[in-house]
Amino acid sequence: MFSSGRRGPGGKVDNVNIGGRVDAVNHDSYPHAMSADQTRVLDAAHGGHSRRGSGETRDRLVEAAWDLVAEGGPEAVTLRAVGERVGVSRTAPYRHFRDKSDLLAAVAARGFELLRAETAQVMAGRDGSLDSIASALRAGCVAYVRAGLARPRHYRLMFGEAAAGCDDDTVHGIASASLAEFAEVLAEGQRAGAVRSGDAVEFAFLTWAMLHGLVDLALSGHFARKGISVEEAAARAATRWFHGPSL
């Protein structure tokens, strides 16, 4: 889904290659409205405001689909069901979404928005020191697994085949931006001489792969059966790319 990215001025990751297509990373845009609690998370990560999408009705339809995924997974989502929940006509959802896949892509995009906001929030405030970089990366990795465990049905939608193979540029763009947050921390570590040389975006993707495995094992009950803390495992995975022993 992801591969190497390009860095702009100051080493900031400006794009990430997804599935053979380079997607520009917009570091400032969140296209869909969120619930009150989620908006507060986005606001904190976004300097005090989050951006709405293309109309109030569309936002309400996405929110209804988000809730249906939480209740019964993607299988519970139909355009008719979200229309009924929002209180619009049967045809109204089709003015905003081509089909169910298009609607689920919007839900996946919303999930990636929230994941990016949550991880960016805990990785902010770095001062360039090794300790702050390592602490930020640990916090970001822990926030990632917490997000997956808190919203398992949304998480599986986000990282499932349907989202990975969809042609929605918004989904891939927001996923790229979320990955780029991790790549930027790793790039800072490289500039500080703490992280091994190499492609920071590739390191970030491989970090996500490790975290994805942890979330998947935890959701399947393996960590609970073995008495292992998934958050501690995530924190250890954070320093995989650092020189010497994990910090």
Image (cartoon, rainbow, N blue to C red):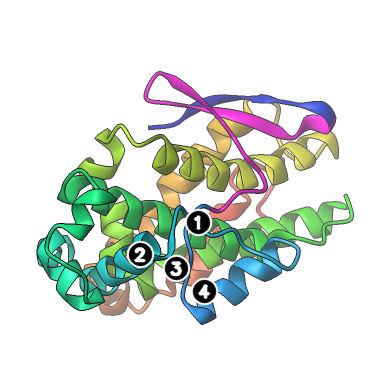
Quadrant housing the N terminus: top left
In contact (CB < 8 Å): disc 1 and disc 3: no
Q: Which residues are magenta?
A: 10-30
How crowded pointer 2 is (Cα within 10 Å; few <14, some 14-19, many 20+) is rated as some
Q: Secondary structure at mark 4?
A: helix
In contact (CB < 8 Å): disc 4 and disc 1: no
Label 1 vs label 2, nearer the camera:
2
Label 1 vs label 3, nearer the camera:
1
Q: Give residue 144's mark.
A: none
Label 3 vs label 2, nearer the camera:
2
First in sequence: mark 1 vs mark 3:
1
First in sequence: mark 4 vs mark 3:
4
How crowded pointer 3 is (Cα within 10 Å; few <14, some 14-19, many 20+) is rated as some
Query: Horizontally, is 125 left or right of 202 in the view?
Result: right
Quadrant housing the C terminus: bottom right
Q: Secondary structure at mark 2?
A: helix
Q: Give residue 113's mark.
A: 1
Three-letter amino acid code at disc 1?
Glu
Residue 31 x/y as whole percent: 51, 52
> Which residue in the protein does label 3 denote?
147
Residue closest to the eye, 27 or 2 = 27
Q: Is residue 42 visible?
A: yes
